[in-house]
Amino acid sequence: MRRIRQTLFSWILLGCGLAASLAHASNSTIRVATYNVENYLIMDRYFDGRWRPAYPKPESEKTALRQVIHAAAPDILLLQEMGTAEFLEELRADLAAEGLDYRYALTLSAADPVRHLAVLSKIEPADIVLHDDLDFQYFDDREMVKRGLLELSFPLGADQHFQVFNLHLKSRFTDNRADPQSELRRTREAEACRNRIIERALERGADYYLIAGDFNDHRDSSAMRRFLRRGELHIGSLVPASDSRGEIWTYFFERWARYELIDAFIASPAMLARIEGGQGHIIDSPEARIASDHRLVYIDIVITE
């Protein structure tokens, strides 16, 4: 676990103070979004009818991705499957050139050297903690949480703050025959993240917190349930979200032609009461399918003056 001090953190600092940052939030709400950007990095990939080794995310997908982000225009954008800091800066700069300016940007490098958690924000964080030390027992070994856990704290108004925990749990691909679809590993990752969240939020008496990202599992899975409660301890509730047609899926697995809800927000009881309308929204513009195999989900949080 590493805390990044305000005078030392590796953010792109272009802004002034807290008042200026809060001015970016529309009226009396802060919009927070989570988005798996599907391999915004260099990798071997099949594109345009050809196999292309060491190939970046295609420009057509990047353009569509930015259009999706513009459609939501979040104040805080939590990202999964981002490459290194250079790729995040490319996205930030391209958005800024198109009129959507994020003053703060950060990637978390954990055990996965390729895919990272990241954040773009218009609002200056009050605190940043990089949880790159999370591990768990997995059969006879101890393993690391591959993408870590990114914790940020933001002002909520009236001397209050809310915490955001960005995560990306293990995919269903497995190299262990004893763990089909990596269900056990994903659950153990969830437990390690959940326990750290309890330590950082609930045990410190925090009322306002969000857990968000790509859970890589359905809402009744053992991994997802880990974030709702531990024994008698209630942690949070899944925030319902839907698109303009009332559909709730956030991920399309083309190989199996399967639509799933795996990207979500979980909110503490007090935080849920601050979410406008008690629900989130999913961007379903035509560009969404080109941009990523996931869809952007956002919520609006009511702040106090």
Image: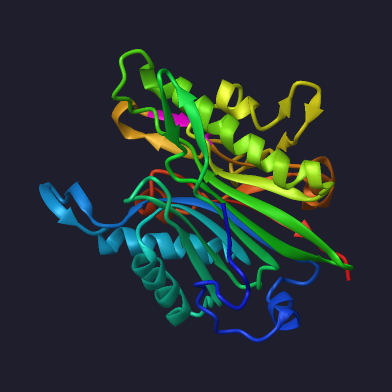
At a point 36% along the width and 46% down the height, the residue shown is: 112
Work out which residue is located at the far top of the displayed protein and give it: 178
Left or right of 227? Residue 171 is left
At a point 65% along the width and 73% down the height, the residue shown is: 124
Identify the main secondary structure in magenta.
strand
Indicate whether 129 appears above or below 210. below
Residue 266 in view of the camera: no
Indicate whether 291 appears above or below 143. below
Q: Is residue 261 magenta?
A: yes
User: Which residues fall within the magenta stretch?
Assistant: 258-262
| Residue 188 picture location, percent across and down | 52, 27
Indicate whether 202 appears above or below 124. above
| Residue 132 picture location, percent across and down | 49, 49
Residue 144, quarter of the rendered image: top left
At a point 53% along the width and 78% down the height, the residue shown is: 101
**What's the coloring here?**
rainbow
Indicate whether 61 appears above or below 250. below
Q: Is residue 172 magenta?
A: no
Residue 55 in view of the camera: yes
Report the number of numbered marks: 0
Residue 4, quarter of the rendered image: bottom right
| Residue 81 picture location, percent across and down | 40, 50
| Residue 91 picture location, percent across and down | 40, 69
Please state, as top left, top right, bottom left or bottom right, where the C terminus lies in the image: bottom right
Residue 178, quarter of the rendered image: top left
Left or right of 173? Residue 207 is right
